[in-house]
Amino acid sequence: MTIDHDRLTKDGAANFAILMHESREKIEEAWAGALAEAQLQETSPKLKVGFGIVIDTEEHKVEYFLTFAVRHKRSIEAELPNPAQPELPITDDPPGIKRKRASAK
């Protein structure tokens, strides 16, 4: 089986337009989610939209598909200790003396 690149390109462009039109409401919902996520993360909103073509030569079929998603990310940042600079055991107590700390009530 040979692949007709011109037809694949023409059909791909047409099917992309159809899929975008059919998915308009869901894409707008995803965009609203992207805006909300951007506000939480204090970044610019991003919506990833993908279009793909799967050619199955055994079944003689072509599948056109559209994907869209908002990435949700939560993070906490912390510093790692530098192993080349170990912390010194410095306390307020004189050497050899351990004071009993007052408990908070």
Image (spheres, rainbow, N blue to C red):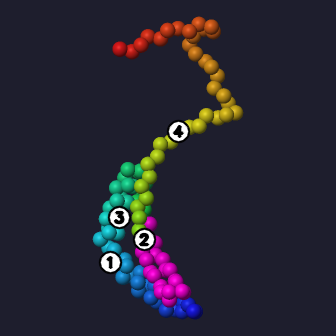
Identify which amino acid the numbered label 3 is placed on. Answer: Ala
Q: Earlier in the sequence, mark 1 or mark 2?
A: 1
Q: Earlier in the sequence, mark 3 or mark 4?
A: 3
In three-dimensional space, the C-alpha distance between marks 1 and 2, rounded to whole angstroms, equals 12 Å
For the point 54% across and 86% down, which residue is it? 58
> Marks 4 and 2: which is nearer the front?
2
Which residue is denoted by mark 4 in the rendering? 78
Q: Position of residue 1 (x, y in %)?
A: 57, 92
- How would you rate the neighbour count of disc 4 (Cα within 10 Å): few for under 14, some for 14-19, many for 20 or more? few
Which residue is denoted by mark 1 in the rendering? 22
Q: Position of residue 91 (x, y in %)?
A: 58, 16
Q: Is residue 76 part of the magenta span, yes or no?
A: no
In the displayed structure, 60 sits above or below 24; it is below
For the point 34% across and 55% down, which residue is it? 36
Identify which amino acid the numbered label 1 is placed on. Answer: Glu
Q: Position of residue 104 (x, y in %)?
A: 39, 15
- Report the residue that reaches farthest toward the front: 58
Identify which amino acid the numbered label 4 is placed on. Answer: Ala
Which residue is denoted by mark 2 in the rendering? 67
